[in-house]
Image (cartoon, rainbow, N blue to C red):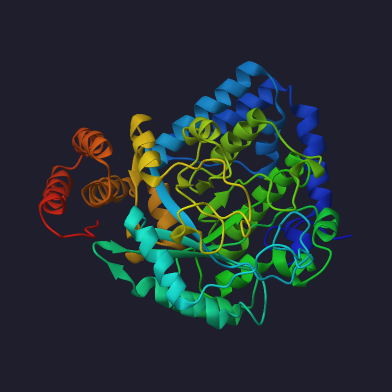
Amino acid sequence: MAIYNPKSHKAEEFINHEEILETLRYAEENKHNIKLIDQILAKARPQKTQNGLHCTGLNHREASVLLACDIPQKVEEMYQLAKEIKLAFYGNRIVLFAPLYLSNYCINGCVYCPYHTKNKHISRIKLTQDEIRNEVIALQDMGHKRLAIEAGEHPSMNPIEYILECINTIYSIKHKNGAIRRVNVNIAATTVENYRKLKGAGIGTYILFQETYHKQSYLELHPTGPKHDYDYHTEAMDRAMEGGIDDVGLGVLFGLEKYKYEFAGLLMHAEHLEAACGCGPHTISVPRVKRADDIDPSVFDNGLSDDIFEKIVACIRIAVPYTGMIMSTRESQEVREKVLELGISQISGASRTSVGGYTKEERLHDSEQFDVSDQRTLDEVVGWLIDQKHIPSFCTACYREGRTGDRFMSLCKSGQILNCCHPNALMTLAEYLTDYASEETKKKGFAMINDELNKIPRDKTREIASKNIEAIKTSDSRDFRF
């Protein structure tokens, strides 16, 4: 029997089944232990230090107790704490991005994904470099500055060379005032050598969802193809970091397995990266199973309610206070509105999950990976965020200034990241408003910028940001950053 060891690089030891079961037993036994719950909440609260605020976070057992707790008063305390932590370290900024699907050719048999190899009626598409240029220009014309590229696993149709060529093409396109400044990559687990190539291509974050941490379920859900190898898939982030990629993004597909098991496994994975690689995940995503082509989410009997979903978001935020949290357009406007304050720091906007979807006026459904619940335009999403008092941010400064991995985390943990993120968000919002926004969005957006500029504590920073924003409004000067 494998022994739990967060410093190990073996999947069965850092995602240890017996440790998760013991954690769930412990959480169930203590879910009404008010004294312990109060101690856990006290530990998680931000503490003032000489360098600002500091959070210790929680381990997977402590966080699992909070998730199991169903005492209404304590659940409300969790939500308030999550909001406090979110505001302390991420402020009211929400970073925007869009997925770009390059190819849906895939040799895996994943039973929850319409790209599975047995699906013979889905339209199989692989974008050419010219088609990618057209897609990127369409995205730039919306105002997007960062993309997450997606591709199925297929060694001959989607080799690493194709992915690298696509990244180079994306970065090369300058259209009017548009430019993609950060390309995050969500492709199948690969080798250290290939991760080095991705790092050399200038990617931002490498993202790979575990789908489920329950090994038996994982093997059943991935019956054929290279993704069937649970250990190779689960150890991918270790190889990515060995290959020099210091920003990695975790995620599970909630609904495939019992959510408490997935929650514990997800936090154990984050703890492992911190213990074994020196830096925890840059982001954690929280997708839920959705309908798509021949996939019916009701087949999976582990679906979770919106209330439980919100609680998961809050508990992750409390447990890993410095890690970004991502929510896609899988979720509705109503759900996204509730969880923004609880911990989400990045959302997609105006997403098309079909290959080649951005150049089509009508949504394509014959090559979609999943149904999109929030189908608003980017301008509508930006305007909605402003109405909700969130700053829509298109910032990519930290990545391009080398503030990644442990350097980003050290700045975040000391609170110093706030000295650059806030003005950077305002400057990138000014770019969007000037170049792409409707008159209504522009009006309320610049009103927000004026209000938020006054909140910048450093006079010099506020003066520089104000000067740069004026230059954005009156000239073609762009891409200012702290």
Q: Seen in the image, is 242 located left or right of residue 292?
A: left
Indicate left or right for 243 with 272 as reference. left
In percent of width and height, residue 390 lies at 36, 36
64 or 166: nearer the viewer: 166
Quick one: which residue is furthest to the top in this view? 73
- Residue 8 visible: no
Q: Position of residue 432 (x, y in %)?
A: 27, 50
Q: Quadrant of residue 138?
A: bottom left
Residue visible at 63% across and 51% down in the picture? 370
Residue at the location (62% across, 63% down)?
Answer: 276
The tally of labels here is 0
Q: Is residue 390 above or below residue 235?
A: above
Q: Where residue 104 appears, x then y in whole percent?
A: 63, 67
Q: Nearer the viewer, residue 114 or 276?
A: 114
For residue 268, side relative to residue 334 (left or right): right
Q: Establish if 304 lies above or below 118.
A: above
Q: Nearer the viewer, residue 16 or 75?
A: 75
**Quarter of the figure with the C terminus:** bottom left
Q: Is residue 253 left or right of residue 397?
A: right
Task: Report which quarter residue 43 is drawn in.
Answer: top right
Q: Is residue 257 visible?
A: yes
Residue 410 horizontal/vertical position (percent): 42, 55
